[in-house]
Amino acid sequence: MNIIVATLGITLPLFIVIAAGLVISSRTEISEDTLSRVLVDFFMPLLVFISLYESTVSVTDMGDLMGTVVFIAAAQYLCVWIYGRITGKDIRGMALSVLFMNSGFIGFPLMQLWGGAEAMNIEIVWDQFSTIMLFTLGFVILGGGFSRKGLGSTFKSPILWAAVLGFLFNLMQVPVPDTVLKVCRFAGAAAPPLAAFVVGVSLSSRRPVINQQVVWGVFIRMGAGLALGLAAIGIFHLKGTLATVTLVSAALPAAVFSYVLPSRYGVDASISQSIVVISTVLSILTVPLSFMLAALIRL
């Protein structure tokens, strides 16, 4: 019972902010696109840069995180591919929402609440590897190959360059003016709660459909994700905070961006949208359960 209460205490602020976004946007016209652009193009890049620049995550741990993200994505794609072969359905409409979790909009504030800067820094590294895969492997899955336009959009991403600069400046010990660091810390602190609020806004405008593809997609994203997270912990010998972040992140709901790319390639995005909405709602239960499992097996 103590574990349940403690876990709910960790996640309750996150879901209150998500609920606030849902309620306020249902009563007042709020542009999700504008909020997302402000978050993704300004607040998140500053958070990513300062977190990676001041990060104490070792190069070895970063390598383990990269291996973990690739392993989980590859294993889940195999599950989706097998589902497609058995049912004969086009898997492009569900693949991205199964492979990629919401490690940014939900992962950042969640890990900040649970483990402070240490856990959030690990989550940021995880999210950057996942984002790179989303905007590379994602294009391959949807379009049958890389496109110049798609790669151009990837390299124009402020978050990507913030991650590159933050990592390189940390590795090479490049001095950054104190004023710049203060601005990054101040503005970056707003990113996690704003990200949670955006999730609530996105939920208010979407009505999910429930069919076989959606059910299997949610199961593979969260259920298989949890199992693969446990497997990754054993394969890469992860311990402590790194192991807990891995287990919880692997079972997070589908990434919000996973329903944007399919529509750009003329693929029906209704399946992805439904997987995003349903998995996000279910995360009210699954996130606490993930933390409880991590505590019970003493990661």
Image: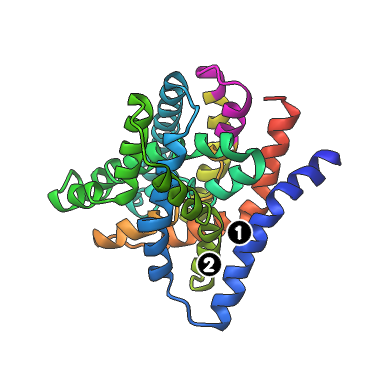
The magenta span reads 233-247
The answer to whether marks 1 and 2 mark residues whose Cβ atoms lie closer than 8 Å is: yes
Which of the 4 quarters of the picture holds residue 298?
top right
Residue 76 picture location, percent across and down: 44, 37
Q: Is residue 240 magenta?
A: yes
User: Residue furthest toward the right?
Assistant: 1
Of residues 206 and 26, the one nearer the viewer is 26
Residue at the spot of label 1: 281
In the displayed structure image, the side of residue 225 where residue 179 appears, left or right: left
Query: Badge 1: how crowded within 10 Å, few (<14), some, or many (20+)?
Result: some
Query: Badge 2: how crowded within 10 Å, few (<14), some, or many (20+)?
Result: many
Which secondary structure, mark 2? helix
Residue 194 picture location, percent across and down: 52, 60
Of residues 36 and 151, the one nearer the viewer is 36
Q: Earlier in the sequence, mark 1 or mark 2?
A: 2
Residue at the spot of label 2: 203
Indicate which disc residue 240 carries: none
The quadrant the C terminus occupies is top right
Of residues 265 and 128, the one nearer the viewer is 128
The amino acid type, in three-letter code, at marker 2 is: Leu
Q: Residue at x 38, y 49 (%)?
A: 45
What's the colour scheme? rainbow
Q: Residue at x 49, y 73 (%)?
A: 205
- Please determine whether, in this image, residue 146 is positioned above or below residue 175: below
- Please determine whether, in this image, residue 120 is positioned above or below residue 273: above
